[in-house]
Amino acid sequence: MSVATRLAAVPGLLLSAPARLIELPMAGLQKLLGIRRMPWVFLTPNLLAVLLFALLPVLINVFYSFTGSDRLYPQDRSFVGFDNYATLLDCGNYLDPATCSRDLFWRALHNSMIFVPVQVTTMILVALITALCLNRDIRGRGFFRAVFFFPVMLSPVVVALTWQWLLQRNGAINAILDFFSLPTFNWMVFPQSAFPWAVFVTIWAHMGFYTIILLAGLQSIPRDVYEAAKMDSASPWRAFTRITLPMLRPVLLVVFVLCVIRSVQTFDELYVLTGGGPGSATMLMVQYIYEIGFAAQPRNFGLAAAASLLLGIVLLIFTALQLGLSRNSRDG
Amino acid sequence: MADTVTMGRTMSPRNLLLARRGGKKLHWTDILTYAFLGAGFLIMFLPVLWVVVSSLKTPANLSEFPPTLMPSTAQTSVVEGFKAPLPLFEVTTKDGTTKTLAQIRRVGLNAQMIDPANPEAGKIVVKVADAKPLRKFHLAFENYSELLSSTGGSDIWRYVYNSLFITVIATVITLVMNSMAAFALSKYRFRGSNTALVAILATLMIPATVVLVPVYLIVSELGLVGNLWGVILPTVATPTGVFLLRQYMLTIPDELIEAARMDHASEWRIFWRIILPLSSPALAVVAIFSILSRWNDFLLPLIVLNHRESFTLQLALASYQNENGVQYDQLLAMTTLTALPLAFAFIFLQRYITSGIASTGIK
Amino acid sequence: MAKLHLENLNKSFGVVEVIPKVNLSIDDGEFVVFVGPSGCGKSTLLRLIAGLEDVTGGDIRIDDISVVDVPAADRGVAMVFQSYALYPHMTVRQNLSFGLENIRMPKPEIENRVETAASLLQIDTLLDRRPKQLSGGQRQRVAIGRAITRDPKIFLFDEPLSNLDAELRVLMRIEITKLHERLGNTMIYVTHDQIEAMTMADKIVVLRDGVIEQVGAPLELYNRPQNEFVAGFIGSPRMNFVSGMLRKQDTVTLSFESPGLPALVLCVESTASLPDVQPATLGVRPEDLLASQDAQTGWPVVVNVLEQHGANSYLHCTLPDGSPVLIHEPGQSNVSRGDVLQVTPRENHWHLFDENGSRIVSGR
């Protein structure tokens, strides 16, 4: 028995007493309802939780987005129609957030629209190269895989604080620059440097996750295909472009869509690392929702709900894209 | 070919280090690979190592620039007539010899010093430029002991308790609830099973951030704002857990359940005594992911837990600087402590975690 | 100890009717084998009796009490599954006692039953092992032991030997037969292997597409198959079939004519009930074909392949029209490839079937 299996047995042991208490009523329930209805008994707790905390909230969110006032409870809220959406979309010039009535929303949107493409392409590129390296027949593969993966385990707060410590005025990054007699910066004070670092830190934290998926994809490509290519005297580059990439395509698609969805939702790391600053230079969509709905006084739940529904639509498009693409690639 | 074989056989240190597994000669692409992986190692690992090293430095040591590589502290000496120990300096005197002196105070560019070996000689005025502080290697474990002691002013044990409570309870509930649902969806044929499965999996597409406001509403309707249960309940019905467990349970032969049914086992007993023990590998994966995400969770606790007594470690960590100023020695120690449990978990469970991710693409 | 009656038993999965209508009576203490090709509904029939599938129509009665609405556990039947379905995480002892614990039987009684079953099956030394640590034959014994501890009225076996290698299968076959003699319970055994059916059964039930083709003692089925299907299914190697026309010659002889072959004269007790001419299929088992190189009468066949098994020889031949004929000769044959033989069926060892496959008349 491996460690994890044993660990998994621990809650089982702890629960054996309550389980006996459950057994009798459950047996009674079975007598009462018959075996046929038992699956519903097993499903009910999970379904209730899903309804209460996932499906119902979507409906409530729609309701919220059409109501105003800073009151939380629905009965206190007044219907305002599309006002929240109109406010969000009210803009003199969509390219210039300063002309919008909710300039912060548009700044966050602009930031996201730069952040997401840059972060996703860099992330996938680096993760792919790493996975290719780790897929080679080299010494210390397990070690390097662990090295690239372990930041995934760190909490966003720890990640943010780690890099805050490195990037502060007297931090290690500046010390290295100073050692080579290069000028030092106060990285987090200037938008031009804070934004790239924000992208970098999120890549640092999540890259390992995608590397693992890509590595699994690479390892599922049968070895004999490469051997056949070698017999056909294909160069390594040709083998990469004509065998690896096409065969990795489904996995790359999954990684791409996952990466986009997560990237759009980035919040924790940047909230702690930069707080969205300097100014609003690194504020992304989710932080805007948080700020408007929870941090600002008075709280504007309606606007937050409207903004999150817009975000949800964007995410839905990407999810649909993933489903469509993955179905396509399975057929093709 | 002959020399490649001997290359592989002779285990010179260089070959041992650089040779590929097959024992073949090193190709330039291998060097490139190692260079990339080596650079990756530095970028991924050193920042965290630096935080750990820094957490063992004294506040004075932390504020130095450029920072010292190793945690160190100023050497001090107790001199007669002075209550506090005085820091020691190496002073270059005018005649070129060096002397160890203790500094009493600094006045502008000059410092008043005293010879600890000969205090009767009286105060000596030295230029600051001529004095170099004497240091010694010192691991400031007091950062940790102060943080962990109840007198340190921080409620760290309360945060640890809150985090642990949420993680353990939520994980246990998740395991039981998800596996019950997975059992129903994998081992029974019944009308509505597909609808139920779709309803559960559809929540995969609803990002937590999108339903932030209504979840907060529901939590507050339940009277759970500021209560740890307010963080536990919304997270227990993970669709990924149901999915993973269901896929696993599908591989358990139906005949086992039929045999158990003929053995007079009730449906609950079948679930508890047959299905759950047999699903332990999948349960382990679900448990690990649940622990990981509950321990690291930030956004939901941030909106639900609105007073300090209910803070989790992550919240306390994130809000640390707001109240105490930036007390970096404590903050870094706390950061290290927060990351530590997961670091250990990772060492033991790496295989499960990576295989779990590889098979589902879900965190 | 129990009698079992199936009355107009019907089972459909959605629109697919797996078992149209089955009527069958099984006497107390009988060893009955359901046999048929895969997909013939024999396993479904067994699962209906076990209570693992719901009946669509008809009735199942055990000792004259209807059990269609009784849950599987309460029918007084025990089942040995094809995959054994041993609980992998429990020891052999726990596997045997799980069902007894579920009905809250007193501990000493459980102990007693487990010990008895274990020693009966010679698995008493394995009680603390897990299924993974057992060989295939041992697992089989544990599965049977689990059924025995429940002391059922009827034992149900679902292809229990199909996962064993050939040698073990023969051994377990004998063991199960002995077990039946010893326990005397009613046993129903499903298999697709007609050798198992022939060697173990008191009564064989041949099934095809959910329909009972014939019920009877093994040799009865072998000697007097009611139709072409049963004739072809029972017996190994398979019976040879030649199609042609059957002509009535007089009151006791028939003539079988196949295109391109000399007519064959077959003697029967009476031809009174037969039409003058009808299309028919002649079936002759390989061991009932007499071949000789110098005979003047009979069908000419060419030897294609000669299989010498030592004690037996199998001659794969073809008729002039190319259809294959297999001849079984005891001992070692001295013909060789390409030889032309004259074959005739042994007297009274042939079967005639009509267009629908039903038996017209058999040689005996």
Image (spheres, coloured by chain):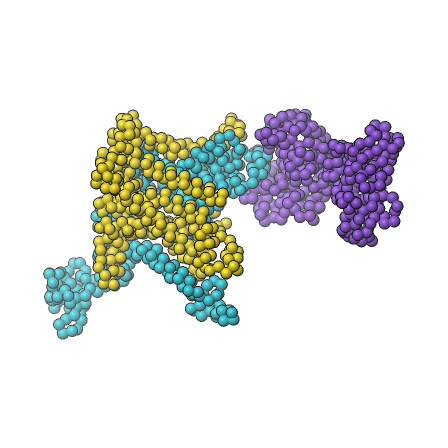
Chain colours: A yellow, B cyan, C purple
Percent across and percent down for residue A187 are 24, 53
- What residue appears at the point 35 percent right and 37 percent down from the top-left corner? A312
Q: Who is closer to the viewer here, C14 or A227?
A: A227
Q: Who is closer to the viewer here, B169 or B352?
A: B352
Q: Who is closer to the viewer here, A262 or A298?
A: A262
- What residue appears at the point 53 percent right and 56 percent down from the top-left corner? A224
- What residue appears at the point 71 percent right and 29 percent down from the top-left corner? C25
In which quadrant of the rendered view does residue C65 lie?
Answer: top right
Residue B307 shown left or right of residue A261 in the figure: left
In which quadrant of the rendered view does residue A46 lie?
Answer: top left
Residue positioned most to the front: C260
Q: Who is closer to the viewer here, A321 or B202?
A: A321
Residue positioned most to the bottom: B95
Residue C163 shown left or right of residue C231 in the figure: left
Percent across and percent down for residue A97 are 23, 41
Residue B49: tell me if it is visible: no
In this view, A312 is above or below B92 = above
- What residue appears at the point 80 percent right and 48 percent down from the top-left corner? C302
Question: The C terminus of chain B appears in which quarter of the rendering?
Answer: top left
Residue A220 shown left or right of residue C97 in the figure: left
